[in-house]
Amino acid sequence: MKTLNIGLVGSGFMGKSHSMAYNLLPQVFDPLPAYPRLRILGDITEDLAKKGAKNFGFEDYAVGFEEVVNHPDVDIIDITAPNHAHKEIAVAAAKAGKHIYCEKPLAVTLEDAKAMLDAAEAAGVKTLVGFNYLKTPATLYAKQLIDEGKLGDIWHFRGYFHQDILADPNLPFSWRFEKKIAGSGALGDLGAHIIAIAQNLVSDIDKVSALTKTFIKERPQASGGTGYSSTADLNAPKKTVENDDAVHMLTRFKNGATGTIESSRITQGRKVYLAYEINGSNGSIRFEHERMNELKVYFSDDPEGTKGFRTIITGAEHPFYGSFWPVAGCGLGFGDMKTIEIYQLLDAVANGKDLKPDFRDGYKVSQVIEAALKSAEEERWVEVASV
Ligand SMILES: NC(=O)c1ccc[n+]([C@@H]2O[C@H](COP(=O)([O-])OP(=O)(O)OC[C@H]3O[C@@H](n4cnc5c(N)ncnc54)[C@H](O)[C@@H]3O)[C@@H](O)[C@H]2O)c1
């Protein structure tokens, strides 16, 4: 079997989840398209890189990303560093002829996202963006139902991604609150996922009218940790939050559908509330990630007297589920979406298959984000193609 060597950059939350998925992959998929060899891990300090490599099972470590990207053994560069680092690493990886798996959002600015897309397309390498919520068996099945015409013409999309993980004003100021590192706030961090779902399941978004707001205007400066694991000392000085806590958006789709997209990182009681409802001329579907093994469906041609939303519990009949478990209801979790992503990545690289969502899809999501920011700032509708 072919072996594909992985170079991972970033050993935080996502570095861990990607590593867990590589390690699990050979136990889930039989046959494997290729064996993932965890070759080298890079992070910003020797301590972080060394610890990450040891904990996640990488053979070597390096400080920074250059050695990882230019390592002669490495076939795939996996980018799990914060948003502002994606461009430099991805462009260098493309120039070195490596395939690239990059976390979302693709970049901090649309300009950076375009540079990444151009570099990858010029190099002819495979690319994948970590919009993992597209990979639940329920959402893959929802796409199947839509593509088969079971819902008829698609009229409405209503999508949300709400969390309360940053609702506490005493949580430290970390990279997610800083414009030059994160770009936008809830919009790019969480909203990017639901925009990707909307564009994948309905059609490209044509025009947006958005409202953004920052509710918690300053937070204590972090003294340790990274991202969601940052810590702050008691009485730490405050730093000004530079991006949105919440976004509400009206959307017009290219296929004529209308919709709304909302996202907030300060919605009390919501954990990973990524949810969507899609209504077509012949039926509707509804999904909530907090119950990710279920899909609710409604078909208008069900017999009179039995009509109503019903709940499908995903099982081996649905995409990828059967590779994990033979029994419906055992359930998949967050990490399993990453395992499915990585299966498709290895299959595409080893066997020349198409891979989605790629950098072009990631760029399109960044265009919607840019249009939404412009719309919110200028308080008007903005055509996505105009940004
Ligand atoms: N797909 C998802 O569901 C999901 C969830 C969370 C985060 N993300 C994305 O994953 C990325 C990382 O987020 P996270 O939550 O894992 O962050 P994190 O802060 O937990 O970890 C980031 C890691 O990258 C390292 N790092 C920072 N700059 C670097 C550089 N220039 N070179 C090498 N390493 C560097 C940090 O030291 C840290 O170890 C972000 O783009 C984020 O938007 C995606």
Image (spheres, helix red, strand yellow):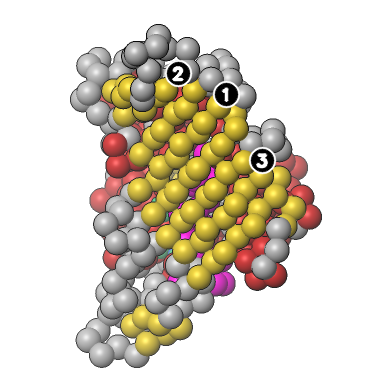
Stretch in magenta: 177-197
Q: Residue at x 41, y 33 (%)?
A: 286
Residue at which label 3 appears: 253
Sequence order check, earlier mark of 1 and 2: 1
Amino acid type shown at disc 2: Phe
- Give coordinates of residue 39: x percent, y percent: 41, 43
Residue reaching furthest to the right: 386
Residue at which label 2 appears: 299
Q: Which mark is residue 281?
A: 1
Q: Quadrant of ligand 1?
A: bottom left
**Residue 184 is inside the magenta segment:** yes
Sequence order check, earlier mark of 1 and 3: 3
- Give coordinates of residue 356: x percent, y percent: 57, 33
Say if 317 sits above or below 26 in the image.
above
Amino acid type shown at disc 1: Ser
Q: Quadrant of the C terminus?
A: bottom right
**Residue 161 is inside the magenta segment:** no
Which quadrant of the figure has residue 85? bottom right
